[in-house]
Amino acid sequence: MMLPKKPLVGIIMGSSSDSKIMHNAAKILDDFGIIHEDQIVSAHRTPTRLEEYAKHAEKNQFRVIIAGAGGSAHLPGMIASHTIIPVIGVPIMVYNDKSDKKSEFKFSAFGGMDSLLSIVEMPNGSPVATVGVNKAANAGLYAAKILAAEFTELKSKLKRFKEKQHQSVLAESDDLKKNGLSKFVQKKFK
């Protein structure tokens, strides 16, 4: 079955500052030709919007929701409690404090562990698949894998992706072996 020309994945985040991390999920989905819809939905500041979004996602037949949040990170769990659509949580460590100094970034008090534990420790009955801190790209890949069960064209794209990764590691290993560790490091991490 071919991918439809409508959103299959919803990407939501608790704040606009989360977009710095969450865009990596969108990039992966774009690379695989998966249409997604992206929104800001705060579990704490817009709780009624969160429930409306869950209904919207079900009405529009989204197959997966990727939800990113920092701090107490309730968004992934709360959206999972309102829908039967699989939710992938992205714990976020880096966020902008919305000060006038846009170049300065703050870090969560617990280095993202607060977000990770808030998402991964959901009670029985409201599961959320969880990727590592700031690993939105992995959430995008996991969504593609979920969709591959229904849309066969994604299976071949995922296999090509894995083969490209494999070849990349072999090429780097050859370069390391040929030039030695010191030169390899100087070239790679200039």
Image (cartoon, rainbow, N blue to C red):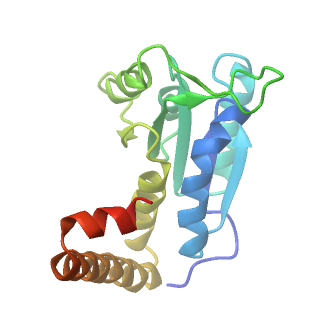
Of residues 100 and 25, the one nearer the viewer is 100
- Residue 23 on image: x %, y %: 62, 52
Of residues 12 and 5, the one nearer the viewer is 12
Of residues 79 and 136, the one nearer the viewer is 136
Say which residue appears at 54% left-offset and 26% top-offset.
Answer: 70
Say left or right for 56 vs 113: right
The vertical placement of 32 against 52, above or below, is below
Taking the view exactly as shown, the residue that stands out farthest to the right is 100
| Residue 155 appearing in the image | yes
Say which residue appears at 64% left-offset and 43% top-offset.
Answer: 20
The vertical placement of 141 against 95, above or below, is below
Of residues 110 and 63, the one nearer the viewer is 110
- Residue 44 on image: x %, y %: 66, 16
| Residue 82 appearing in the image | no
Say left or right for 183 vs 10: left
The vertical placement of 62 against 103, above or below, is below
Say which residue appears at 63% left-offset and 22% top-offset.
Answer: 43
Task: Give residue 160's quadrant in the image.
Answer: bottom left
- Residue 114 on image: x %, y %: 41, 18
